[in-house]
Image (tube, rainbow, N blue to C red):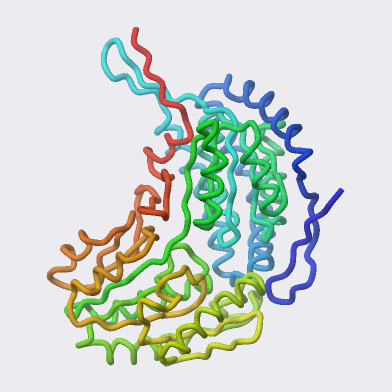
Amino acid sequence: MPTLTSYDAHTRSALGTVEITTAEQMPALINNAQKAQKRWAALSLTQRQQCVTQAYQQLEPVQNQLAMLISKEMGKDYRRATYEAGGTIQSAAYFADEIAQALTTDQLDRSTELQYRPLGIVAVISPWNYPLAMANNLLMPALIAGNAVILKPSEETPLVAELFVNTLNKILPQGVLQVAHGDKQTGQALVASNINMVAFTGSMSAGKQIMASAAPKLKRLVMELGGNDPMIVMASANIDAAVQFAVASSFENAGQMCTSTERVYVDARIAAEFEHKVVALARQYQVGPWDKPHVNIGPIVNPKQHQSILSQLQDATSKGAQLLLGRDDYPQPFINPTVITGITPDMRLEQDETFGPIVAISHFNHIDDAIIRANDSPYGLGAVVFGGQGANAVAEQLDAGMVGVNQGVGGGNAPWVGAKQSGFGFHGSAAGHRQFAQVRVISK
């Protein structure tokens, strides 16, 4: 059997292997899922909720093991990895209850009710940057809705997925949750197979391929396709608060986060003070292996991503951007905290999703210019504006699915939603949970 090797993001040493799911094996997985899904869907919504909640309780003894695998496979510092593992596990009961409430039949009037029925088989294709949390956000509503799930994790983080699925399957009925390991060929085979829905988080280009493959049979889609999130800092902003957010958001998870701030547009009148304070704060960040104390920026996930970040930095410096902190030729596997200014629209740092610990700054003289540049992107996941009077009016003009005013995006029970080419459908919230079900109107 062909195998997939998982590598330590820091040392590039082998961590372990899993069996690759080939295209020839896919029909057997689908057959298992179809049989299991019928039995699973026959249970009541409450029974499925209780079973899933009990399955997640089995994760508690392996919480530290999951966190360590997250750190090793994708480089996330251990503190953040423990937050991801602990948050996923500790919030499971609440999340399951929220999903069940969203999927409860609605009585519209005396003769009509709205039901939320299973779709069948859902393929969940999850990313490497939050290998447990992002898989969970798509997997749990699909299961509780009565679907069987085949999880295709990133080939960068197979061991996290293997432990996650194997542990849940100590309780879940056989065949209800399966894992398919491999690269994009495995993902393509899964999408092309006899499934009913694809829930995907990943790149825009991969999302377009999935959409084309799903089109002939009109398979349901929920896709989050990355971002290139802008931040506008008005002259009326609380500069210290804006600096704190710009640095923290740009450096979170070594910048490998879909809602990381990737483009900062700051009013020219306050730009010098803003940049000085950004550099001072950025210097405080510690870079190193996940298991070293006080590290808050770990290694980049793999050499390919490391080179992609460097190529964007080098493109910018070759076109006139100035490095205020850091360099554009870091050796693998780290990218140190980097602050660069003088970004222009023709630079890849402005055009592309960077996924690295970079604060990329531009100046503006008029707020309309900042809004135009913030919106001049095919991406539209998140956007942020910091300012006093007038900040809300600026926020209203930003083309993004999630906009924060003097704070980050999202929060509460809001959906996770992208605009333009950053999203197709959405997840989270009652409305998002219902996208994993077929709405059926019964009139009696």
Looking at the rendered image, the quarter that the C terminus falls into is top left
Residue 362: x and y in percent read 32, 82
How many marks can you see?
0
Residue 294 visible, this angle: no
* Residue 411 sits above or below residue 32 on the image: below
Q: Residue at x 19, y 65 (%)?
A: 394
Residue 125: x and y in percent read 59, 48
Residue 91: x and y in percent read 49, 49
Residue 399 visible, this angle: yes
Q: Residue at x 52, y 85 (%)?
A: 314
* Residue 380 sits above or below residue 96 on the image: below
Residue 341: x and y in percent read 37, 87
Q: Residue lying at the far right in this picture: please name it.
A: 1
Q: Residue at x 78, y 39 (%)?
A: 24
Q: Residue at x 20, y 59 (%)?
A: 396
In the picture provided, is 323 more to the left or to the right than 56?
A: left
In the picture provided, is 181 more to the left or to the right than 389?
A: right
